[in-house]
Image (cartoon, helix red, strand yellow):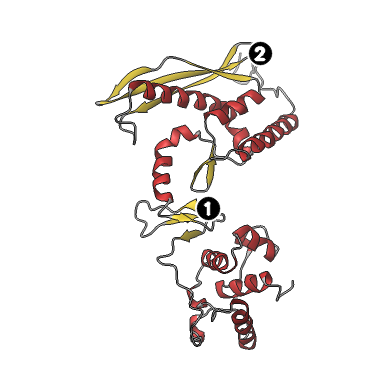
Amino acid sequence: MTSKDLTVIEGSFVELKRDPTEVLDDAKRAAKALTTVIDQKKRKVMIKGQVYLEYEDWQTVAQFYGYSVRTHSAVPVDFNGVKGAKAEADLIDFRSGITVGGAESYCMRDEENWGEKPWFQLASMAQTRAGSKAIRNRMAWVVVLAGYAGTPAEEIIQEKIADKKERDEHWCQLHNVAFFKRGKMKGYAHQMEGGEWCNEPEETPEPQPDAPERVSSPPKQVTSSNPPEQEDGYSKQIDEVLGLGGRDLSKLRTKSDVQTAIFEDTKLQPKQQLALLGVQNWTVIKDEPADLYQKILLLAEGEVKE
């Protein structure tokens, strides 16, 4: 046989087991059903604006596809002097009894809040993590399709605890997510849709309804694309809408600043602000921050119609 000869091995070609369209249709129905279940939960695990599913939620997804989890006994482990528990879990097709997947996971005493816990609690958490991970390895794509994080909440429990500690002191009420500070970050912030950052304000200015008069900011401090004759009209309308002497527009430097300012003045959430503007994403908005603030505020008050 020469180098150009080909040997055909019967059954060696990869074939689709099902029509991909049917697979996706089934997954969309499962994702929709999962969303209904998660929406009814009173206490969801949210970290940095993302919902993470707990073990019971992953079991729900597994049931949709006829899978169940079988966990094995946890065993003690020691890694470089750090003790903990290790457990394995199998993903079973309960219609045939065949093992279709599995995973192993750990719970170690060097994790926050686990250093002094009794052995049975470490063992139980290791089993829980292994079970959720076994389902995740096969079903994460459905969970992500539903809009949730593809990592089980139990695998990031330490980060969840740290986030909970920050919630009271560093919480963004505008986006309903915790501000965080990592690495070389100078202050607390969180990332928004589109890649922009929402920075925690250093202080919240007190409203002064009894202020005798408004001191206008120098024109050079406000960046705007509108002609000067329109600026005066806008400022007058803004003063009438706010009724508090206006806001220093020179401090609005980003879209995040605008979102925060509008929320403080009108209690409109970012999604509601987008609806007023008639767009679905902040990235398509090209207005200068000062102009954008005025536009949203006037739309909210019915002074400007598109």
User: How far apart, in angstroms, are the residues tagged by discs 2 and 1?
Assistant: 42 Å
The answer to whether residue 209 is above or below residue 191 is below
Q: Position of residue 57 (x, y in %)?
A: 57, 31
User: In the rendered structure, are the residues bearing label 2 and label 1 in contact, judged by CB atoms less than 8 Å apart?
Assistant: no
Q: Nearer the viewer, residue 84 or 167?
A: 167
Judge depth for marks 2 and 1 and give the one in front.
1
Label placed on residue 95? 2
Density class for disc 1 (Cα within 10 Å; few <14, some 14-19, many ≥20) is few
The answer to whether residue 133 is above or below residue 51 is above
Q: Position of residue 93 (x, y in %)?
A: 62, 16
SS label for mark 1? loop
Q: Quadrant of the C terminus?
A: bottom right
The residue drawn where x is 40% and y is 17% is 74
Q: In the image, what residue type sits under mark 2? A: Arg
Judged from this view, the residue extending furthest toward the top is: 97
| Mark 2 vs 1, N-terminal side | 2
Q: Position of residue 124 (x, y in %)?
A: 42, 22
Density class for disc 2 (Cα within 10 Å; few <14, some 14-19, many ≥20) is few
The residue drawn where x is 50% and y is 27% is 133
